[in-house]
Image (cartoon, helix red, strand yellow):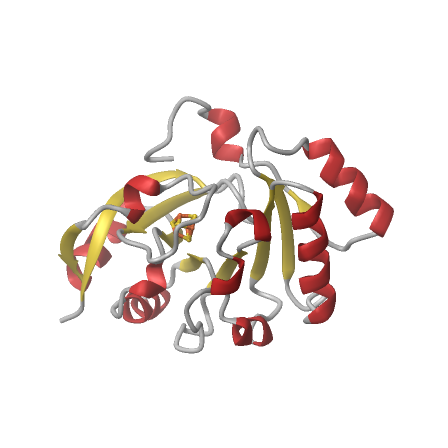
Amino acid sequence: MERLRVNELFVSIQGESSFAGLACAFIRLAGCPLDCRWCDTAYARQDPGRDLGLDALLAWVEAQGVDLVEVTGGEPLAQAGTPALLAALCDRGRTVLLETSGAFDIGAVDTRVHVIMDVKCPSSGMQERLHRPNLALVTAKDEVKFVLADRADYEYARAVIAGHGLEGRCGLLLSTVAGRLAPAAVVEWMLADRLRARFQLQMHKCIWPDRDRGV
Ligand code: SF4
């Protein structure tokens, strides 16, 4: 049976996608081979995690009484068992979100899953880790996200969007690294460019500014 290394399980508000504001059961998997400068889940990246079987995870989700489930990390696709977990959650009728850096092939991910791909911008230091063929696989149910720290990041995001024909093909999300870039600046750039993307603030951090886990 598939086993996964899990950092934390919790129910909270989905905070950063077009599903923001909905109650969501989160499965945060442990470990990530990337080292993003702005990583806000270093505790999950460095954690060996506790070993849980697929059945235990499905039972936990069942007990929460929440329709929306997000598998996040760390980097979920760094674990071989993640595609089976995602498919099993879909089979049980859940709306399933996968938060991924895009560094691993999403080709094995069940097509019912909403992929939320956090494309790493230059300031993160991990720009080159993107598995670019992933950008050809995203569809209308998926969302591509860019977290920006400066104007160069914005221009990179705009170039990726245009270069891969993402406008109108999938959801597009832009947000800022907290304390690094004024949200108003990004919104003004987006409006000037008539960019067909959604600006978002991290809702869970607005609600619980002092909590960095379990939200
Ligand atoms: S991919 Fe996510 S978990 Fe991994 S280092 Fe980057 S921000 Fe942190």
State left or right for residue 163 relative to residue 59.
right
State left or right for residue 74 relative to residue 126.
left
The picture places residue 125, in percent across and down from the top left corner, at: 50, 51
Kindly identify the residue that appears in the image at 84 percent across and 51 percent down.
193
Front position in the image: 38 or 170: 38
Kindly identify the residue that appears in the image at 64 percent across and 34 percent down.
181
The answer to whether residue 63 is above or below residue 206 is below
In the rendered image, the quadrant that contains the C terminus is top left
Front position in the image: 195 or 59: 195
Does residue 54 appear anywhere in the picture? yes
The answer to whether residue 6 is above or below residue 81 is above
Kindly identify the residue that appears in the image at 68 percent across and 71 percent down.
164
The picture places residue 174, in percent across and down from the top left corner, at: 64, 47
In the rendered image, the quadrant that contains the N terminus is bottom left
State left or right for residue 58 relative to residue 37.
left
The picture places residue 114, in percent across and down from the top left corner, at: 49, 62
